[in-house]
Image (tube, coloured by chain):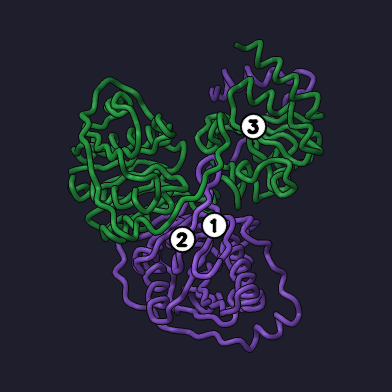
Chain colours: A purple, B green
Amino acid sequence: MKILVCITHVPDTTSKISFKDNNTSFDSAGVQYIIGPYDEYALSRAVELKEQHGGSVTVLHVGTAEAEPTIRKALAIGADDAIRVNAVASDAFFVAKQIASVAQKNGYDLILMGRESIDFNGGMVHGMVAELLQMPCITPIMKLDIEGTTAKMSKEIEGGKEYVSCDLPFVAGCQEPIAEWKIPNMRGIMSARTKPLEVIEPSAVESTLVYTTYTLPPPKGACKMIDAANAGELWQLLRNEAKVI
Amino acid sequence: MSVLVYVESNGSEIKKSSLDAVSYAAALASKISGNVTALAIGAISKDHLKDLGKYGAQVVLHAETVPESAMAIGTAVVEASKQKSAQFIVLPKSVLVDSLVGKVAVVLNAAVVSGVTELPSFDNGCKVKKAIFTGKASVQVELQSAVKIITLAKNAFPATENTGEASVENFSVSLSNLDNKITSLSKEKASGDLLLTEAPLVVSGGRGFKGPENWGVLLDLAKTIGAATGCSKPVSDMDWRPHHEHVGQTGVKVAPNLYIAVGISGAIQHLAGVNSSKCIVVINKDPEAPFFKAADYGIVGDLFEVLPKLTEAAKQLK
């Protein structure tokens, strides 16, 4: 079974977010980058499926050479090889087109990624990739098992979950608790250095989205403290001052 | 100019987030001198559909027999959009919409922005604002395609109700093979509970409760004020509460009018799931808990004493 896992390279969840160049671009100074947390769930499950059923796991990233340490970490976690499409990931459709063109060329039984990136929170790439490849799209999945050529999954629905099945191939967006994150061991880290990482040039895409100005929310006012002995006062404040009830 | 808005139902009733989306579509349509068509799927009563007129829809396309699957609904949105030559498609952001919006955008060759928080501005191109970095910032995006798709962030644009009645038209959709490839085996839904993502009031509990057997005081408060219940990641990891109650970066993101966090220290990953709330109340026995920095109101105290007091006071309020 050939599995493709698409990963994002995103600021760590604890990063302080700021912008530069008159609020037209993200300021990456001092920011630690990680594999997108949802993508890492997808990768962890892909590695487990390979261990159970054999086959291979390829990681794909659309981005510049700055992401190579993140890609190497994915290899250390257990992917066999990696592909980097050498381009700035300008928007969801651009990224989806690149993924679809790699998938068309190489052919995969399963294409996994996170339910959304944690920088732009679009959650749209899997749906676009699926449509471009004329495959079903299932998201966000929380459990994934393969029997023969059929997958059984559970996916989140509002207020609960749904169990579904689908024949391979398909595209899925993943979230916890599909697998536990894997901490790379020394052997994984050593072997990641020599695993193949192919760099390819992007296919041309006409973009119809332009990101213009970034803004930060206004600073939060001080927290108003209420004495625990008179906790009931809270409701008056919420009704008359905050006007939220 | 035509605006198409997809409305989700909760079995029989239209969801609040969808009513918000209809009001948003109506406000958008008035900016561009357009009209609003709503697309509704499944068994919803004619009265509920006509009532969408109160929120600004002129026409409702009712596709009663389309199955409740993202692939099929995606096809229905595409077909409805073609029939009405829609320039704008408005979708209420939800897990279902997340799995169909990519398909709709590709088929219609449309630019799409998800999690939009304001009406578009039309000076110098069509620009919308969306939340990024899980609510820690926002960005203005210009859509340059002929057909434009917006998914509306939860609780970002409260519905306004007026008078009016929409005309309801039956709508049929021919599904492709691709739409039928996913088989639904079964569903598990928390019955009778308020939907966490839709609720205007949410009460969440953390490790401060010390165990699942102590959740009663939180449930009492939630029931009294009519709030949905959530929890922090450690709580769902330890199976004290079901996974679908997990609020945070990798769980459910909520944007209620009021979020009450009890016994939750306020890790940045939890804050990422709640920072779009209009008002945050934090109850914690540790005055140094980082959550107080993100709160509007705080109470330092033992939750097992504070919560029953709040519940009693809330009963007096009614």
**Rendered location of residue A100, percent (x, y):** 39, 72
- Circles 1 and 2: CB distance less than 8 Å? yes
Residue B34 in percent (x, y) is at 19, 39
Chain containing the residue with disc 2? A
Mark 2 residue type? Cys
Query: Quick one: B5 or B262, which is closer to the camera?
Result: B5
- Horizontal side of residue B136 vs B65, given as left or right: right
The kind of secondary structure element at disc 3 is strand
Picture coordinates of residue A170 (x, y %)? 44, 65
Using the image, tell me which numbered label, if any, was put on residue B203.
3
Residue that label 1 marks: A153
Q: Looking at this view, is A149 or A206 the one in front?
A: A149
Circles 1 and 2 on the same subunit: yes
- Mark drawn on residue B247: none
Give the residue at the far front of this rendering: A148
Q: CA distance from mark 3 to mark 2?
A: 37 Å
Crowd rating for badge 1 (residues with CA inside 10 Å; few <14, some 14–19, many 20+)? many
Residue found at x 45% / y 79%: A86
Which residue bears the numbered disc 2? A166
Res A172 seen here: yes
Judged from the image, the secondary structure of the residue bearing numbered disc 1 is strand
Amino acid at pointer 1: Met
